[in-house]
Image (tube, rainbow, N blue to C red):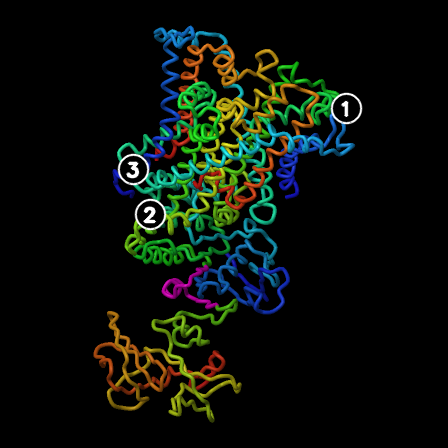
Amino acid sequence: MKTQNQRAWFFVTPVLLLVAFNALIPMMTVVNYSVQETFGDNLFFWQGLDWFEQVLRSERFHNALGRQFLFTFLILIIEVPLGVAIALSMPKKGFWVPFCLVTMALPMLIPWNVVGAMWNIFTLPDIGLLGYFLNHTLGISYDMTQNPIAAWVTIIVMDVWHWTSLVVLLAYAGLVSIPNAYYQAAEIDGASRWAVFRFIQLPKMKTVLTIAVLLRFMDSFNIYTEPFVLTGGGPGNSTTLLSIDLVKIALGQFDLGPAAAMSLIYFAITLFASWLFYTLMTMNDNKS
Amino acid sequence: MRLKSLVPILYILFLMLPIYWLVAMSFKTTNEILSGFTLFPQTWTFANYIDIFTDPTWYWGYINSIIYVTINTVISITVALPAAYAFSRYSFVGDKHLFFWLLTNRMAPAAVFALPFFQLYSAVGLFDTHLAVALAHCLFNVPLAVWILEGFMSGVPKELDETAYVDGYSFPRFFMTIFLPAIKSGVGVAAFFCFMFSWVEMLLSKTLTAVEAKPIAAVMTRTASSAGYELGLLAAAGTLTIIPGAIVIYFVRNYIAKGFALGRV
Amino acid sequence: MAQIKLSNLRHSYQPNPASDADYALKKIDLTWDDGGAYALLGPSGCGKSTLLNIISGLLVPSEGKILFNDQDVTSLPPAKRNIAQVFQFPVIYDTMTVYDNLAFPLRNRGRDEDTVKRRVAAIAEMLEVTDMLKVRAANLSPDNKQKISMGRGLIREDVNVVMFDEPLTVIDPHLKWKLRSKLKELHQRVRATMIYVTHDQTEALTFADQVVVMQDGEVVQIGTPVDLFERPAHTFVGHFIGSPGMNVLPCDVQNGAAFFRGERVALEGPVATAGDGAAEIGVRPEFVKVSAGGAGIAAKVRKVADIGRHKVVEAVAHDMRINAILEGEAPNAGDDVMLDFKQSQTRLYKDGWLASQPEGGAR
């Protein structure tokens, strides 16, 4: 049991101040903008909930949101099973373990716009390794600046490249924490490979996989820099995800009101979806 | 068994290919790049690297990045340590709500904060300073550090604290000489994550800087926009941004799996 | 069910063992009879878990063979050997109910649901867990989890052997006793061969009909609990079993008689082997008589410990500590006493091994 101690607030005050400065003040600014109209020169007029209504009704927002959900959905159904599969096939001990972990973590430590730039260079139709290979060796016509499908495939593959390792490392951490006796018992009980996965490995990975799904959901839902650098949201608007659209409106068009309203709606969706995921994934635990 | 070991090998190969291409590109001459596809650099050149190391806008980009990343890591860990201790050892009014609220900041889309941050840091006169970026990154790094450290601290039995008090240690002395060494891998992992997210984040650091504190990756954007003929230089700059990350992972390689599970395995 | 024979078994965890010290198991020849209740007793690191894992097939021995009913199973995997094993920590399948946990080994072998139902009901009744069958196994207390692990071991009717690897380690002391008697009862009902590995002599002696004592990768003695107690084949067994353990005193042997610091000590019978290793006298505290004046060796009482039913007297004679167990009256610390060893229970050991024979013939 933890001790009841109100002095603990003293310990958390620095964090509180720092995060409040960074979160509350900007958040107030956003809320402020979202209910006002401005014509520059610091002149503001009360606008009520009009901006929210406008954003929620706009087809542009619906499309961006739709693309965002599609992107996040594809990311999750590809990266999570793939990450688990790779973690399962990794060695449990020996020289290769630190090697695998370090090389796998490497993509996550590259600045996000460098990731975009790197994939740009990698996929250039005539001088990129992948672009050249597809176009000239396999004879598949590939140019992601022209073809929306190619652009989508590229941003998905890029994100798989960038973030699958997060799932791998989390799943791996869960796997190595399983005592050997479980595998021995299963072997003696005559369990199949599938049964070992289903009844031993998967349950033991549950906590870390919950973290993995949550992190991957949040980060892929908020993604901005990598696809922006790679495709700029194009061709057309085909890869304009929610963040990209938001920045276009806020910094590009300087439509502060709609951008602020969109920000709040965006944040609310992220929070709600994260909460939903978390609740669904931990429901079984609470039931018992 | 053979097939099984093939999976990680193929995966690592897939991870290395784009990196290889970036590195290979950085050693090619502009002529070679534009004249067509070559798998290996035909004429090796260090010209791109020499350009970077002799041009102040380039190498100051690196120094700027390293300065704000370091400041951010130090601030994040310093404030997160006592808070994580409080969350792992005490229960107090509103602790759960506070913890959840902290985590929601990790969920906030950076794009939402870009403009208000610009205004906030301009208003307090910190725009285009290293401190501005370091503080802004605290938005998501502090909650993360608290989360990771809390996980590791909860793995240390409470009896350790009690024994120390019985032995007559004061709280600060106990914290510094007994507790910190006990969770030093956790501190290492948390610092690694702060470094990592501050190093890779680009939207906020680009928004909050103009000249004086411009990060390396933002300097690259200048080159990227003038697409085509400076690809070699871009590749060289990109290659150099991978190195600090690689060095840092090497130091935490033994805790990396546990670290990514945030100490919760 | 089957008779299990280990022949010339040796095992090393190193790829190229050079000396005897590299072997975790040094040459084991053993036969476990069908339907017996065996205990494998020894201190931590003596190789008992290694031996167990070799029988179950989790380890393949470096040398030697394992025969089930004269059929060589040395290279068979665990699933093919038809054995069951219960581990030190309860291994249960968290996401399944108790019923599914118990049914798991049967379903994996493709038994029909009627058989499964019948067996699970029978085992659950024996273990007294019938009312928990629908509960998720993750929510059970540690002792109930261990009961379920045991149940999974006993669920198949045709297993060759059920092995228990220190199964009571994580169980509360007051429940240990209950589970232990449960296990004994189960053995009498199902009549499967059972091997129980432990470092706890009480567990071993109460459970088993035959106890195998191991030390440093070797079998030191096999026998009934009474054998081990009364005629330890090695001073190690004497030390390890009994509380306090056997008194072992250095001595000289001249013409078949033993002398402790010059005082003659009467042995149970003639000294068998001629060897000239270091000789020791072994006598259990239960067979040391303490008197104020009388026959025996003069000693000074150092300490008397009252441990309930009896008292342990610790006396010193010629700088050697000798324990005696007394019921009823005992001397006080500091008293001068005489210690008399019961002749029929006083044995001679050479190089640690039993060297005396009882009067009236060899055993």
In which quarter of the view is residue B106 placed? top left
Magenta residues span C195-214
- The residue mark sitting in front, 1 or 2, is 2
Residue at 49 percent of width and 56 percent of height: C161
Please say whether residue C113 is visible from this viewpoint. no
Q: Are marks 1 and 3 on the same chain?
A: no
Relative to A108, is B37 on the left or the right?
right
Instruction: Please tell me if label 3 and label 2 are on a single chain.
Output: no
User: Does residue A221 show up magenta in the picture?
Assistant: no
The residue type indicated by label 3 comes to Phe
Q: Is residue A277 left or right of residue C338?
A: right
10 Å crowding of disc 2: few (<14), some (14-19), many (20+): few
First of labels 1, 2 by sequence position? 1
Q: Is residue B9 visible?
A: yes
User: Pointer 3 and pointer 2: residues touching (CB < 8 Å)?
Assistant: no
B47 lies left or right of A266: right
- Subunit under mark 3: A
Residue corresponding to mark 2: B172
- Is C202 in the magenta? yes
Q: Position of residue A227 (x, y in %)?
A: 57, 21
* Quadrant position of the N terminus of chain B in the picture: top right
Marks 1 & 3, CB-CB < 8 Å contact: no
| Tag in front: 1 or 3 | 3
Amino acid residing under circle 1: Gly
Q: Which residue is mark 3?
A: A10
Q: Which residue is mark 1?
A: B36
Chain ID, mark 2: B
The answer to whether tags 1 and 2 share a subunit is yes
Kind of element beneath mark 2: helix
Q: Nearer the viewer, residue B231 or A126?
A: B231
